[in-house]
Amino acid sequence: MGKRKGRRKKSKQQKKSSSAGMSIGLIAGGLFAAVFVIGIGIFVWQSNPSGSKDDLPVRKISREQIKFTSDSDLGQSRTTAEWLALLKEMRTTENMMRATFLKARMPNPEAFLGADPAAVPDVYEALKDPRLEKYGQAIIAKFGQSAEPPYFQDVIDGLNSDHPQVRRAAVQLLAHVKPEGPDTAQQVGKYLNDEDPEVVKSATIAMGAMGEPGFELLFTQLKGNQSPSPQLLQAMALFGESAAPAVPDLAKLLTVESTQQRLLVLIALEKIGSSSKIALPELIEVWSTESHEKWSEQVTAVMNRIGKPATTAMLEKFTQVPAEAQIIATQHFIDQKVHEAIPVLIQSLETPKSAESRQVALDALSGMLPESSPTDEQLAALFEYGDTGLRVWTLEEIAASKERCVKYKSLLTQVRSQLETSLANPRVEKSKDEYEAGTRLVKRIDQVVESL
């Protein structure tokens, strides 16, 4: 009997042992499978971390509204729909005490009600009610400042509405639509040919924020178009460097006489950057013949982004262009620290095309010369045609070499005589600082000449 009991006990232990082994095996197998799946996932993600167009996540639509807190002392928090319902009650109730209480809760609803994608259908309903219309318009306007864009389907519903206020709001919202999946750009692109120019405007702005799919669709609108909409050109600027393929078409637009269009083209080329060098012939033409005040800032910005090729082109034509163009080029030389421009800047001092272009050249030389080594001839020209500040610096460069002092003794004497005459002439306007600086320079010239 004892032996039998022992066998049964042993048999039970074997079963437990076998069950434990199976459990461990299953757990180990499960862990291996999990690790394998995770490994495959990591491999796929590393192979395509950003995802292809077809892999773009589809945006989930949620109707759970955000709660906004009133700016009153009561500090109540409610959803847009709840606040709109209270506003409607405030405007319709005949109970004066109730109306006063509600007004205390909502002293300035346009200020605290914000943009909420989930609440757009409720806002549409508010726009249909003249008593709530202004609140709905205030909410719609805030989508331009919101990081959370409206749902595209809500925008489509609004565009299809027969109510003018709802459609107008949907047109505004269309400009703020963002990609919700791989086909959003194509769907928004359909509105680029809408009969309503305001819809086209909003669709174009939206496309400008949709990356490559948006660019491809807008690029087809730009090709061969001699009068593109301002929004289309603004969208090209939004694409930045990605819009490089559009440069040849943008360059052609620089030849069209349109102030607004040219400014927008220049802004787009500046955002595109160094790839805009393809448009350099047209840019140089605009710079050299039409460098009016309205172009100057934009032309300088484009040339700075293009860099060395623009510098070379402007250096070649610098002496031939009018004062306005020289000012733009000089500003470019300053921004880019172009020391190669020193010879043409010095030359421009001899026969300045305007007082302003001369002053800009003097400012540029004052910054560049301490970091360069001008030739003797350049030093002589600087001393003869420069202002007091440049002459002080140049004189010390000349005084550092006895050979130079002897070589330019007559020039030193000549400039000293001119300075003395100018300082003594009461009809020549000069400040106290200018008079004192001139006087010090005359004394220093005397010291250098006397040392020979």
Image (cartoon, rainbow, N blue to C red):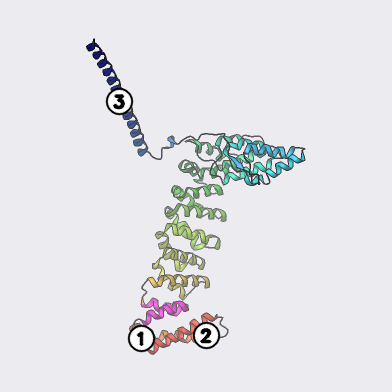
Asked if residue 74 is positioned above or below residue 396 in the image, the reply reads above
Give percent across and percent down for residue 249: 48, 49
Instruction: Determine if residue 254 is in view.
Output: no
Give percent across and percent down for residue 364: 45, 70
Question: How many C-alpha atoms fall within 10 Å of the one at disc 1: few (<14), some, or many (≥20)?
Answer: some
| Residue identified by numbered label 2 | 423
How many labels sit on residues? Answer: 3
The residue tagged with tag 3: helix, strand or loop? helix
Numbered tag placed on residue 406 in the rendering:
1
Q: Nearer the viewer, mark 1 or mark 2?
A: 2
Q: Residue at x 35, y 36 (%)?
A: 42
| Residue 156 falls within the magenta-colored stretch | no
| Residue identified by numbered label 3 | 24
Q: CA distance from mark 3 to mark 2?
A: 103 Å
Residue 160 placement: quadrant: top right
Residue farthest toward the bottom in the current orientation of the protein: 450
Q: Residue at x 75, y 41 (%)?
A: 97
Left or right, 345 with respect to 70, comes to left
- First-in-chain label (3 vs 2): 3
Q: Residue at x 68, y 43 (%)?
A: 105
Give percent across and percent down for residue 358: 49, 72
